[in-house]
Image (cartoon, coloured by chain):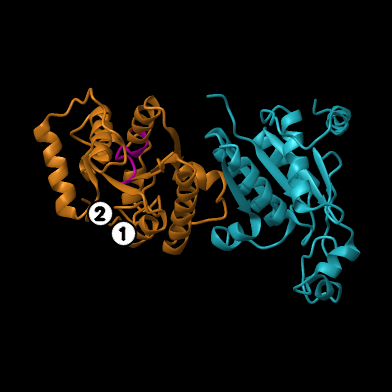
Chain colours: A orange, B cyan
Amino acid sequence: MTQTGFTIWLTGMSGSGKSSVATATADRLRGRGLAVEVLDSGRIRSQINRSLGFSQEEIEENTLRLAYECAMLNRNNVVAIVGSVSPYRAVRDKAREQIGAFVEVYCRCPMEVLMQRDAKGLYERALKDEVKHMAGVNAPYEEPLKPEVLLNTDQLTVDDAATQIIKTLEVLNRLSRDEGSAYTADEEEMIRQRLENLGYL
Amino acid sequence: MTQTGFTIWLTGMSGSGKSSVATATADRLRGRGLAVEVLDSGRIRSQINRSLGFSQEEIEENTLRLAYECAMLNRNNVVAIVGSVSPYRAVRDKAREQIGAFVEVYCRCPMEVLMQRDAKGLYERALKDEVKHMAGVNAPYEEPLKPEVLLNTDQLTVDDAATQIIKTLEVLNRLSRDEGSAYTADEEEMIRQRLENLGYL
């Protein structure tokens, strides 16, 4: 059996749709018979990294623990899907280096939309500094410069977002092609062109 | 595909042979086509839990992180093999509860043999209190009361130890039977009897 493990790393600000897209993508991949583990950085924080805070150094440690787990899953042919704000570019790049088979997905959403969606009122409270460490408000969020997939999550359905990830994985040869693709040859060519321009092909 | 993931948890004092037995057992299981991950608690400490010390609470946290990783691997049909002193009975029992498909292996070795083998002089130094937190010397080591496998590692070859684990997994129906078993029907019956007496069958 060839190595089928790889990591899909969803980064983006709170509320940008990482978890929904992670779940939908996991369902699609499981439908193709792959073993898939979704790692949610918040859940991991509460379950195994309880002692970690939110300094840059602690965020880095949390991120690299996630990366360690992804690499472990990948070498056992399990696909890992991470949904994590992971606000620091350099730390995401370390995760990429550590994991190798790494596909970065940027869930991009304008702040005004994030604030409209903000059911828990976190952004509102962060703007008043009542909530600390809110990436993009009172803590840094460094946008990816070269994500394999760029999702404008304010304009896409969750289903279309998952399709775009799956298609990119096919073009990257991490997944075998699905015959019943909803993509036209032109759309696929656009993905290929983009990945080539970024140096991933 | 049925659930093939389970965890083999090797406990025992430093130098009792956990790592060698883990490696040999992993080789056998890989030879049967299973995906196997060996988790060494020392390596994990140095790589992902750097901030953890050696208080009882911190040892518990380290152990439960290991258990979390085992459960994650197991539900993706990867066998996890842990080599960890894991000196506290209650903490090992928590790991058992968290993991479910858990087989405890006690690597037992008399202190005088451990001290003879002690290449790094750790026991000698612990006896003088120059090394702290040495389980069985200046920190507790609570022997398992009901391990699925009891290995007297001063009397067994690594190969025989691995065979005993594999045979136990077969009797527990975690592994399908290997036709070319080196075990006689009587030896297998002894394992079955022991597991039945302990309540595992």
Question: Gap between marks 2 and 1, in whole Å?
Answer: 7 Å
Which residue is identified by label 1? A89
Which residue is identified by label 2? A143
Number of marks in picture: 2
> Where residue A56 appears, x then y in whole percent?
41, 62
CB under 8 Å between discs 2 and 1? yes
> Where residue A12 appears, x then y in whole percent?
30, 46
**Which numbered circle lies on residue B157?**
none
> In which quadrant of the rendered view does residue B126 lie?
bottom right
Q: In this view, does B185 lie to the left or right of A56?
A: right
Which residue appears at 80% of the width and 35% of the height?
A: B183
**Amino acid residing under circle 2:** Glu
Q: Please tell me whether residue B114 is drawn above or below residue A118 in the rendered image.
A: below
Circle 2 crowding by C-alpha within 10 Å: few under 14, some 14–19, many from 20: some
Q: Is mark 2 on a helix, strand or loop?
A: loop
> In which quadrant of the rendered view does residue B140 lie?
bottom right
